[in-house]
Image: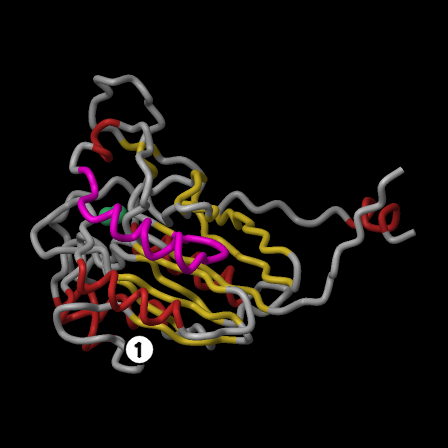
Amino acid sequence: MLMLLCDTRFVALIGQLTDTHVLARDDQETEVFVDNNARLVDAVASIRAETTPVDVLIGTGDLANSGHPAEYEALLELLEPLDVPFLALGGNHDVRELLRSSFPGTPWVDAEHASWSTVVAGVRLVGLDSTTPGEHGGRLDEERCDWLDGVLRAPFDGPTLLAMHHPPFASGIRWMDMHGFPGLDLLDEVLTAHPVDRILCGHLHRPMASTFAGAPAQVGMSTVQHVALDLRPDAPVAVIDNPVGYQLIDVRPDSIVAHSRYIRTAAPVIPAWASEFDQ
Ligand SMILES: [Fe+2]
Ligand SMILES: [Fe+2]
């Protein structure tokens, strides 16, 4: 019988919050499907209560709902109880300048290109800005891919996670795919030359997994409504209030396991089962 021995040493726990679509505190007019800000309150409380502390949180875009300055003020207030670093990325609902000024500690590339790269707990984290002001879909160009190439070319002894708002694969959900993603050929070239260990995305509001350039690529669930799962070629625009939450990426020497943490549906651990597995 083949025994697979795993290296269970813990390296890092990376949290991913995505598509929080925060509203201004006094916004009574914007039509939303759920209470976006209350969902983030719940997520932050849940992250604080994690039995294994999160080393860093990545916010993979659409952190604000419409990019109004008051939304970023509310976002910072809602994130304030967290005592871990927060690495923000822009989504198509964000405004780059406001995101940059709201998170001044992030090592942004420049005013037109809100990417960053850093190392936390032995893991290289790279955030790639896939947004273009005024556009719903993702777009990459030579400048951004050249920057990424330079980052990934540098020697690093450890795993690399690449975060970006727009996933580099088609979801099969018509209205989320219809804008395409120009520049993916450039990204494919870079990642083929310099592989990463995992690609973490948002934008689609529902969890899904695929691959890109040989790397596992996944979308994290939003804290607000999900895009409805409808794979018909004429699927209408539709959202659904599925259970929501955030992602925990458990990085170990020989594995990277992505977990979904649901909020508002959590049931207590059943101690009776624990003793059986502790043998
Ligand atoms: Fe979104
Ligand atoms: Fe988005």
- Which element carries disc 1, helix, strand or loop? loop
Rendered location of residue 247, percent (x, y):
48, 53
Q: Residue furthest front?
A: 193
Height in image: 138 above or below 80?
Answer: above
Find residue 26 and report its image quarter. Answer: bottom left
Left or right of 256? Residue 108 is left
Find residue 68 and report its image quarter. Answer: bottom left
Disc 1 marks which amino acid? Thr
Find residue 177 and report its image quarter. Answer: top left
Q: Residues within 10 Å of mark 1 (few under 14, many from 20)?
A: many
From the viewer's side, name the closer residue of 112 and 195.
195
Left or right of 55? Residue 93 is left
From the viewer's side, name the closer residue of 80 and 227.
227
Q: Residue at x 43, y 40 (%)?
A: 207
Its colouring scheme is: secondary structure
Give the magenta-colored segment's residue range. 180-200
From the viewer's side, name the closer residue of 27 and 109.
109
Left or right of 13? Residue 129 is left
Rendered location of residue 224, percent (x, y):
33, 46
Q: Residue at x 26, y 47 (%)?
A: 184
> Quadrant location of the N terminus?
top right
Residue 183, magenta (yes or no): yes
Residue 155, magenta (yes or no): no
Which residue is denoted by mark 1 in the rendering?
Answer: 106
